[in-house]
Amino acid sequence: MPTKLRWSMLTLLVVLTAGLFLAGQDQAPQTPQRGHGAMGAAANSPDAHLQMLAEKLNLTDEQKAKLKPILQDQSQQLKALHDDTSLSPEQKTAKKKAIHESFQDQINAVLTPEQQTKFKEMKHETMEKHQ
């Protein structure tokens, strides 16, 4: 994969996960946001993220069951990273990238090739809106 494309994908993953993490910090009940792109609803919680993916990618019940613990684990790791005051901002950024890459591979392993293509398109659309 070309380096520029890899960095673009990595940047997108950081943006998406940051949105998931930051939205998850609000203690008030959360509802999916409309009009914020395909990934807008995903910013609320692992469950909202799963629901959005299920709708957009037409996930099977088996895929949803496999993705739920992956998304929960990702959320927990990102929260722990956010709460870790011993790391510099640069270290946190590097660790976020590593977490995103790890979970991206896990998510793709559950998806069909067609779903992977659609998921990639969704991430690309979200990235364009945030630039």
Image (spheres, grey):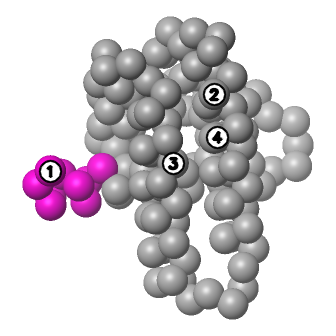
Q: Position of residue 38 (x, y in %)?
A: 46, 26
Q: Amino acid at mark 4?
A: Leu
**Tag shown at residue 91:** none
Q: Nearer the viewer, residue 38 or 77?
A: 77
Magenta stretch: give its range.
Answer: 1-9
Q: Amino acid at mark 2?
A: Lys
Q: Nearer the viewer, residue 90 or 61?
A: 61
**SS for dot 4:** helix
**SS for dot 1:** loop
Q: Nearer the viewer, residue 71 or 11?
A: 71
Q: Residue at x 45, y 75 (%)?
A: 94
Q: Position of residue 77 (x, y in %)?
A: 68, 60
Q: Earlier in the sequence, mark 3 or mark 4?
A: 4
Q: Which residue is mark 3?
A: 103
**Tag shown at residue 1:** 1
Residue at the extreme left: 2
Q: Which residue is mark 4?
A: 71
- Marks 4 and 1: in contact by CB < 8 Å? no
Q: CA distance from mark 3 to mark 2?
A: 12 Å
Q: Amino acid at mark 3?
A: Phe
**Tag shown at residue 66:** 2
